[in-house]
Image (cartoon, grey):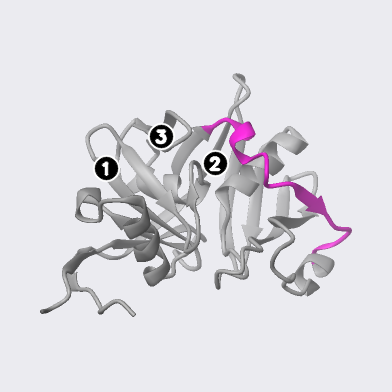
C-alpha cells in the first residue's frame, strides 16, 4: 500500500534584503485540512525542516496554525509577515488572537502586541564584531537574541538569533518576534540586519503595539507530493 499524498507547501523567503536575497525560509500549507491533527502537523513540520511551517485553516478569515520542527507556536513574526504577503488579508488569526496585516507594495507588515514575544529577551553586545563572532550556544538554555548597534542614531542594528531547542535550527536567519521585543525594549523604530543579511523593519505604534515588516519572495508554489513512508 502506497503512502498517502501530502500537500507540498508554498515556500517563501521572508525578510529579504533590498536585492531579494537572504530571508528566512517559510513553508505555508494553504489547505490546512490536508494535514489534520496537531501530531500530524508537528511531524510534517519536522519533515520539512523549515524554521517555521504554517497551516492555513481558513484562508478567508486568516486562521493560521504555526509550527517549528519541534513545537507549535501561538505567535511568530516571520510566518505571519509571510502570510500577510501571501494571503493579502487585513487580519490574521494565529493562536494568540487577531493580528493586523498589510502590504505596502514593497514590505509586508503585521502589528502585534510585544507581550506575545516576552520570551525573546534581547542581549546587547558592545560591537557588531562581538555579535558576529559569537559561537552557536549549546541547546537547552532558551532563546537567545544577540544584538549591537551598527548606527545608533539611525536605528540600524546587527543581530543574531539562537532558538536553543535542539531541533536542527541552531541559528534563525530572521526572527520577527525577537525584533518586535527589541523595538519595544528600545522604544524606537529599527532597521535590523540578522543572520547572513536578512532585513527586518520595526515601527512602534501609539497603541503599544509594534509593527514588524519586510520583503517576501516566493521560492516555489505548492502542490501535492507523495509522502515518504513513516520510519
Of marks 1 and 3, which one's residue comes earlier in the chain? 1
- Residue at position x 22%, y 34% from top? 60
> What's the magenta region?
112-128
Looking at the rendered structure, which numbered label has been put on residue 101?
Answer: 3
Expressed as whole percent of the image width and height from the top left, the position of residue 135 reads: 76, 75
Indicate left or right for 5 with 12 as reference. Answer: left
Question: Which numbered disc, 2 or 1, marks the residue closer to the eye?
Answer: 1
Q: Secondary structure at mark 2?
A: strand
Q: Which residue is mark 1?
A: 57
Percent position of residue 221, x then y: 23, 63
The quarter of the picture where the N terminus appears is: bottom left
Near-viewer residue (19 or 220): 220
Query: Residue 155, image x and y in percent?
Result: 73, 45
Residue 107 in view (yes/no): no
In the figure, residue 105 lies in which quadrant? top left
Task: State the residue in front, 126 or 64.
Answer: 64
User: Considering only vertical position in the picture, is 228 above or below 61?
Assistant: below
Q: Is residue 99 left or right of residue 33?
A: right
Q: Residue 212 bears which disc, if any?
A: 2
Q: Nearer the viewer, residue 64 or 181?
A: 64
Q: Do the residues under discs 1 and 3 have CB atoms within 8 angstroms? A: no
Amino acid at each position: 500500500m502506497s503512502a498517502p499524498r501530502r500537500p507540498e507547501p508554498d515556500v517563501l523567503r521572508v525578510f529579504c534584503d533590498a536585492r531579494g536575497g537572504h530571508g528566512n525560509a517559510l513553508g505555508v500549507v494553504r489547505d490546512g485540512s490536508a494535514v489534520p491533527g496537531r501530531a500530524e502537523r508537528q511531524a510534517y513540520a519536522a519533515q520539512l525542516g523549515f524554521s517555521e511551517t504554517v497551516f492555513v485553516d481558513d484562508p478567508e478569515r486568516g486562521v493560521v496554525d504555526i509550527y517549528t520542527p519541534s513545537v507549535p507556536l501561538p505567535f511568530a513574526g516571520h510566518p505571519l509577515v509571510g502570510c500577510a504577503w501571501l494571503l493579502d488579508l487585513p487580519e490574521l488569526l494565529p493562536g494568540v488572537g487577531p493580528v493586523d496585516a498589510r502590504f505596502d507594495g514593497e514590505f509586508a507588515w503585521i502589528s502585534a502586541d510585544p507581550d506575545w514575544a516576552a520570551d525573546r529577551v534581547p542581549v546587547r553586545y558592545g560591537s557588531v564584531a562581538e555579535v558576529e563572532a559569537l559561537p552557536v550556544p549549546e541547546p537547552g538554555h532558551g532563546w537567545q537574541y544577540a544584538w549591537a548597534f551598527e548606527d545608533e542614531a539611525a536605528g540600524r542594528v546587527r543581530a543574531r538569533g539562537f532558538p536553543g531547542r535542539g531541533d536542527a535550527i541552531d541559528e534563525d536567519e530572521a526572527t520577527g518576534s525577537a525584533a518586535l521585543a527589541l523595538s519595544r525594549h528600545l522604544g524606537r523604530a529599527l532597521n535590523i540586519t540578522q543572520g547572513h543579511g536578512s532585513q527586518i523593519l520595526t515601527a512602534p505604534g501609539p497603541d503599544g503595539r509594534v509593527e514588524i515588516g519586510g520583503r517576501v519572495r516566493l521560492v516555489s508554489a505548492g502542490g501535492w507530493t507523495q509522502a515518504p513512508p513513516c520510519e
